[in-house]
Image (spheres, grey):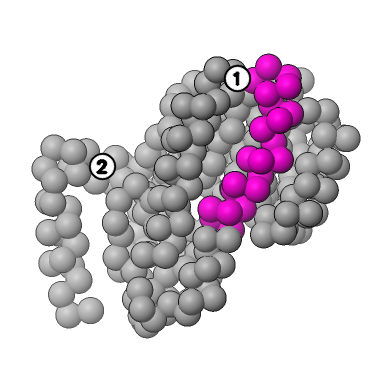
């Protein structure tokens, strides 16, 4: 057994794929979510990341069953897509509550145990929208960008404690997650095509981060090309987006 991994948001989609991958790699996985985790995990524990007491209770249950964690992976997410000013304020705030504050709650609960055992890993699934501006994903991207900066700052502080903090930033993946948002003010999003990245690809890349085999990363050939273009030809991708958005 490689250790105890706590996966938050593991009931379906990418979180379930990550929980399965870590289980296959020999971890005892505690799946924390509002619903049960996938078959095969060591334990499923109810958790609402928007509630302080629920997160604290869930971590108590996870450590009682699996011991102090070697890794904590945050996969919970809330989509919000649409024309920026058409997105209802309560949904925009919900996105921040799950995508940023939920992560912050989980880190607060996990960090003392990781530090006490001499180290470990904190990994979060973010998004390319948190790395660069994406049309019709203003609130979602802002919440993920806040999470990225939070983790980058924490990583500098956590290194002396032996805790490796990292994140993965994939693009569009056909899990139904984006479609759940409702496309406020739109008939459809700007794109529903990605880089043919599968949930299993995300799970493998996330597990590699847990095991320290790579640092934070963008996942997908299109997403990697976009971030490269932003470095070597600033503004080029924005010009492409503006052309695609004409008439929308």
Which SS type dominates the magenta stretch? helix
Where residue 234 appears, as percent x and y from the top left, is 13, 46
Q: Is residue 186 above or below residue 146?
A: below
Give yes or no for residue 23 being in the magenta stretch. Answer: no
Residue that label 1 marks: 161
Where residue 225 appears, as percent x and y from the top left, is 24, 42
The answer to whether 139 appears left or right of 37 in the picture is left
Residue that label 2 marks: 227
Residue 113 visible, this orientation: yes
- Label count reads 2
The answer to whether 98 appears left or right of 128 in the picture is right
- SS at circle 2: helix
State the residue at coordinates (52%, 64%): 95
Check disc 1: other Cα within 10 Å, few if <14, some if 14-19, many if 20+: some
For residue 50, what is the image quadrant? Answer: bottom right
State the residue at coordinates (39%, 40%): 219
Residue 198 visible, this orientation: no
Q: Which of the two residues, 99 or 75, is positioned nearer the viewer here? A: 99
- SS at circle 1: helix
> What is the span of residues highlighted in magenta in the rendered image?
98-119
Q: Which of the two residues, 43 or 73, is positioned nearer the viewer here? A: 73
State the residue at coordinates (12%, 51%): 236
């Amino acid at each position: 057994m490689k250790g105890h991994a706590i996966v938050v948001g593991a009931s379906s989609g990418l979180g379930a794929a990550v929980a399965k991958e870590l289980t296959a790699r020999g971890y005892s996985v505690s799946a924390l979510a509002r619903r049960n985790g996938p078959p095969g995990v060591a334990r499923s524990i109810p958790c609402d990341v928007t509630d302080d007491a629920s997160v604290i209770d869930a971590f108590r249950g996870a450590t009682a069953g699996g011991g102090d964690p070697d890794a904590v992976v945050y996969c919970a997410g809330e989509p919000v897509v649409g024309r920026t000013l058409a997105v209802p304020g309560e949904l925009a705030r919900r996105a921040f509550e799950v995508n940023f504050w939920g992560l912050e709650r989980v880190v607060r609960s996990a960090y003392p145990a990781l530090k006490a055992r001499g180290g470990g890993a904190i990994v979060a699934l973010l998004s390319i929208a948190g790395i660069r501006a994406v049309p019709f994903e203003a609130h979602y991207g802002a919440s993920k960008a806040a999470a990225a900066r939070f983790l980058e700052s924490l990583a500098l502080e956590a290194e002396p404690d032996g805790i490796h903090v990292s994140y993965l930033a994939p693009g569009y993946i056909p899990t139904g997650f984006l479609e759940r948002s409702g496309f406020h003010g739109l008939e459809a999003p700007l794109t529903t095509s990605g880089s043919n990245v599968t949930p299993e690809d995300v799970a493998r890349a996330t597990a590699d981060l847990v095991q320290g085999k790579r640092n934070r990363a963008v996942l997908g050939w299109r997403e990697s090309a976009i971030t490269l273009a932003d470095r070597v030809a600033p503004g080029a991708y924005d010009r492409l987006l503006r052309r695609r958005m004409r008439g929308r």
